[in-house]
C-alpha cells in the first residue's frame, strides 16, 4: 500500500517544489528516520535539509522556518507520535509549509500527509516511515527538473575511489562544508588529480556549496 500511494507523495512534492530549506523532525524511534530522510532529500533534490529532534527544534531552530522553507514531521502513533505533537501544534500555529508522515492532524486540513499503515508496532515503524520519504525524494527531484537517477553525493569524502569515478564521469559530488581557502585547497587537490593523476596524500573532505563533476572540474 505504501509504494502504491504515489498520489499523496506527489502532492507533497508539489507543495515543496519551491522550497530551498527543509527541516525534518521526529522523536524517539522516528528521529533516525528524520535524519535518513534529510540525507536522501539533499542527495536527490539539492535542498538544504536538516534533521532535528523535536525537542531541539522547539528551542531555536524553529526560527529558520521562513517563507522559502518547509518542515516534515515523522509522527507515527505511540509514544513517539505523542512526544512530537507539541512541535506539530507549534508548526501549524506558525503557518509552516508542513507535511506529516503518519495520521492526519485533527483541525489541520492545510497540512500535507504521507500516510502510514495502521496498527504497526512503534519499534517497527521506521521500516515503514522511510518508504514514503524515499519516494518523496525522487518525486521532488523530478518536480525540480532534476534527474534522480544521476548519482550525486552531498558533502562527500574525496576518497581515491571517488576521485576515480569523478574522472570517469560516473560521479558528481558537492563541495559544501569547508569555507573559503579550505574549499579552494580541496578543489585544487581534485584538479591536480584529474589533470595530472597526482594521488592525494590524505582523504579530503569537501565542504562548500558547489557541485563538481567531470564537466566542470577544470573550471
Image (tube, helix red, strand yellow):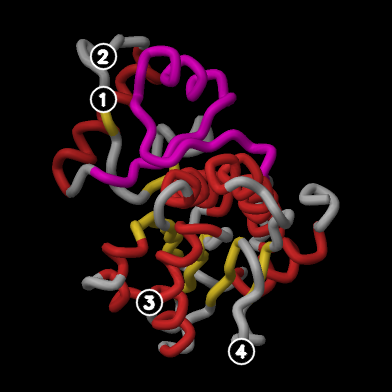
Q: Earlier in the sequence, mark 4 or mark 2?
A: 4
Residue beneath label 1, please? Answer: 204
Mark 2–mark 1 distance (CA, rounded to whole Å): 8 Å
Q: Earlier in the sequence, mark 3 or mark 2?
A: 3
Q: Position of residue 132 (x, y in %)?
A: 68, 52
Residue beneath label 3, please? Answer: 65
Whether residue 19 is in magenta: the answer is no
83 to 124, vertically: above or below: below
Residue beneath label 2, please? Answer: 200
Callout 3–callout 2 Cβ contact below 8 Å: no
Callout 4–callout 1 Cβ contact below 8 Å: no
100 to 34, vertically: above or below: below
Residue beneath label 4, please? Answer: 107
Mark 3–mark 1 distance (CA, rounded to whole Å): 32 Å
Number of the front mark, 4 or 2: 4
* Residue 212 seen anywhere in this rendered image of the structure: no
Q: Position of residue 25 (x, y in %)?
A: 43, 60
The kind of secondary structure element at disc 2 is: loop
208 to 25, vertically: above or below: above
- Please tell me which residue is depicted at 50% across the width and 63% down the height of the picture: 81
Q: Earlier in the sequence, mark 4 or mark 1?
A: 4
Mark 3–mark 4 distance (CA, rounded to whole Å): 21 Å
Q: Earlier in the sequence, mark 3 or mark 1?
A: 3
Q: Position of residue 104 (x, y in %)?
A: 65, 74
The kind of secondary structure element at disc 4 is: loop
Tell me the magenta residue range: 148-177
Callout 2–callout 1 Cβ contact below 8 Å: yes
Mark 4–mark 1 distance (CA, rounded to whole Å): 50 Å
Q: Position of residue 218 (x, y in %)?
A: 40, 33
Q: Quadrant of the C terminus?
A: top left
- Please tell me which residue is depicted at 22% across the width and 71% down the height of the picture: 59
* Residue 150 seen anywhere in this rendered image of the structure: yes
Amino acid at each position: 500500500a505504501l509504494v502504491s500511494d504515489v498520489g499523496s507523495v506527489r502532492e507533497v512534492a508539489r507543495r515543496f517544489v519551491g522550497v530551498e530549506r527543509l527541516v525534518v523532525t521526529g522523536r524517539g524511534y522516528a528521529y533516525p528516520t528524520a535524519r535518513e530522510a534529510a540525507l536522501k532529500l539533499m542527495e536527490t533534490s539539492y535542498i538544504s535539509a536538516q534533521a532535528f529532534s523535536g525537542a531541539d527544534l522547539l528551542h531555536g531552530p524553529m526560527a529558520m522556518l521562513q517563507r522559502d522553507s518547509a518542515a516534515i514531521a515523522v509522527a507515527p502513533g505511540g509514544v513517539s507520535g505523542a512526544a512530537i505533537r507539541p512541535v506539530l501544534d507549534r508548526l501549524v500555529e506558525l503557518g509552516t509549509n508542513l507535511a506529516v508522515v503518519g495520521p492526519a492532524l485533527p483541525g489541520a486540513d492545510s497540512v500535507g500527509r504521507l500516510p502510514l499503515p495502521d496498527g504497526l508496532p512503534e519499534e517497527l515503524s521506521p521500516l515503514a516511515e522511510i518508504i514514503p520519504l524515499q519516494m518523496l525524494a525522487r518525486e521532488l527531484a523530478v518536480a525540480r527538473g532534476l534527474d534522480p537517477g544521476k548519482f550525486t553525493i552531498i558533502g562527500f569524502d574525496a576518497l581515491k575511489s571517488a576521485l576515480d569515478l569523478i574522472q570517469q564521469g560516473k560521479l558528481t559530488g558537492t563541495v559544501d562544508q569547508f569555507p573559503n581557502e579550505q574549499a579552494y585547497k580541496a578543489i585544487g587537490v581534485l584538479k591536480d588529480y584529474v589533470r595530472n593523476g597526482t594521488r592525494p596524500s590524505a582523504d579530503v573532505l569537501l565542504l562548500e556549496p558547489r557541485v563538481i563533476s567531470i564537466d566542470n572540474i577544470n573550471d
